[in-house]
Amino acid sequence: ENTTSNSLEEKLKLQNDIFLQLSKSKLVDDGNVLEAIRDITEKVSGVVQSTRVSVWLLNQEKTLIECIDLFQKLEKTHSDGISIFAEDFPIFFKYLLEERVIVSNNALEDEARSEFKEVYLIPNKISSTLDAPIRVAGEMVGVLTIEHVGEPRQWGIEEVYFLGVVSDIISRLLEAEKRKDAIEKSELVKHNLEKLVMSRTNELNNLKTHNEILDTKVYGNLYLTTIVLSPLGSNRNRSSKVVTEFLSRQSNKFNFRDQDLEIGGGI
């Protein structure tokens, strides 16, 4: 009995240590999902002494859950990519929506896991499982799973509790990822808006400069024409000829000025 008590105390202490580590995890707070999940599956495997720990996430259409990480302790490997479709395993998905933790001491006989017997449990020699649904804002978005290989295993209350808390930490991780994505999208929108404002400002400045050049040309012509016409008022015939020649020369000068401005020069 003392041995059992000491063993339980050691488990609880180890669990609390893991809770503390994960609560301070920068990977979790920063929303680095893949790295954080790998760290979590390894830690859970060490605490529960289970050979297989995995995290599955629900797709946007809510038609399947996909394994984003499966840690296998004996091989010390991480893998992903397996998908479980809701239409193929309706009983299991029903339990995911309703339970805090699905406890299957004998997974081969348990109703929640009965659909997996031939296609998954027996081929992988899995006898006992724990499944903790991951929820964000009350919605089931995934599941944290522990799979025991070998003889059936009786899960302890402390292990069930531990898995439930870790699933909550994964929920926090996914929420952090959402915040991170929202901030990045906001920064991108802000950057694009600043570029648009700058572009429009440059266009307006260029238009203003162009209009100023046109105004200078028009008012310059009017002013010079007035100067020329005034002293020639007494001789209309000669005035007409002089004005025509003058305006022709002025037009040529401004045409040259326009061309020169286009290539960056000046008169």
Image (cartoon, rainbow, N blue to C red):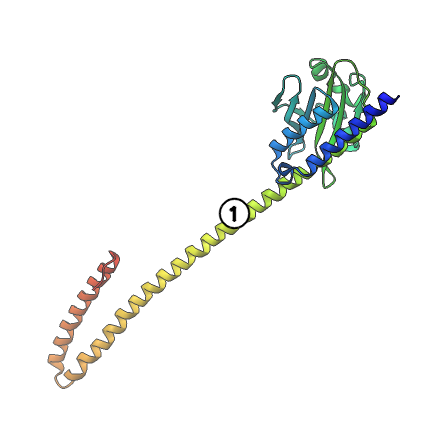
Residue position marked by numbered label 1 in the rendering: 188
Q: Secondary structure at mark 1?
A: helix
Picture residue at 33% right of the left edge, 64% below the top: 209
Q: Can residue 53 be seen by looking at this rendering?
A: yes
Viewed as shown, does residue 74 lie left or right of 202?
right
Quarter of the figure with residue 174: top right
Front residue of 68/201: it is 68
Taking the view exactly as shown, the residue that stands out farthest to the bottom is: 234
Expressed as whole percent of the image width and height from the top left, the position of residue 97 reads: 76, 32
Q: Is 30 situated above or below 238?
A: above
Picture residue at 19% right of the left edge, 62% below the top: 256
Quarter of the figure with residue 60: top right
Expressed as whole percent of the image width and height from the top left, the position of residue 122 reads: 72, 13
Front residue of 28/132: it is 28
Expressed as whole percent of the image width and height from the top left, the position of residue 246 reads: 15, 73
- The quarter in which the C terminus is drawn is bottom left
Q: Can residue 55 be seen by looking at this rendering?
A: no
Q: Amino acid at mark 1?
A: Leu
Viewed as shown, does residue 254 lie left or right of 136?
left
Mark 1 is surrounded, within 10 Å at the Cα level, by few (under 14), some (14 to 19) or many (20 or more) other residues, namely few
Q: How many marks?
A: 1
Quarter of the figure with residue 204: bottom left
Expressed as whole percent of the image width and height from the top left, the position of residue 221 reads: 23, 73
- The quarter in which the N terminus is drawn is top right
Taking the view exactly as shown, the residue that stands out farthest to the left is: 238
Front residue of 180/156: it is 156
Front residue of 47/69: it is 47
Picture residue at 73% right of the left edge, 32% below the top: 17
